[in-house]
Image (spheres, rainbow, N blue to C red):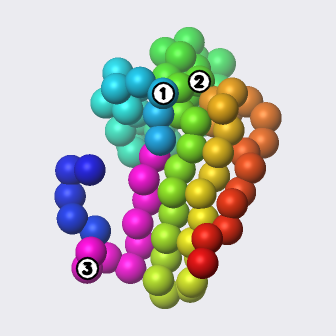
Amino acid sequence: MDFNTRTSSHVFINIFKDKESAEFLTPSKMAYYAEKVNDNTGDKHYRNFIGKYEKNTSTGHHAIYFNPDGWLWGHSQEIQLD
């Protein structure tokens, strides 16, 4: 992680299969390529985006989402955390 989230009420951590995709898919690029699912560049990296962790202390939402086939293909499994 590049920043400290201890004082934030929202935490989001994306999980990738490889470092190249993690470095390529910045938040702005994720938004851009999510709308262009047929773009080969975005598809390549989204196939390596396999999960995310989310925590919101304001709402109590706390979960891990996982999809081993990549984020844009199929449905992710949600695992609620306490």
Q: Is residue 24 visible?
A: no
Span of residues in magenta: 6-14
Q: Nearer the viewer, mark 1 or mark 3?
A: 1
Q: Residue at x 46, y 46 (%)?
A: 14
Q: Is residue 31 visible?
A: yes
Q: Nearer the viewer, mark 2 or mark 1?
A: 1
How far across and down, in percent of the image, does residue 33 sit?
A: 52, 31
Circle 3 Cα neighbour tier, 10 Å, few/some/many (<14 / 14–19 / ≥20) = few
Amino acid at pointer 3: Thr
Mark drawn on residue 47: 2
- Regarding mark 1 in the picture, which secondary structure is present there? loop
Q: Residue at x 31, y 30 (%)?
A: 23
Q: Which residue lies under the disc numbered 1? A: 17
On screen, 59 above or below 44? Answer: below
Amino acid at pointer 2: Arg
State left or right for residue 27 relative to residue 69. Answer: left
Mark drawn on residue 1: none
Q: Which residue lies under the disc numbered 3? A: 7
Residue found at the very far left of the displayed protein:
3
- Regarding mark 2 in the picture, which secondary structure is present there? loop
Instruction: Indicate the quadrant containing the C terminus: top left, top right, bottom left or bottom right.
Output: bottom right
Q: Residue at x 57, y 44 (%)?
A: 51
- The answer to which of marks 2 and 1 sits earlier in the sequence is 1
State left or right for residue 53 relative to residue 81. Answer: left
Residue found at the very far top of the displayed protein:
40
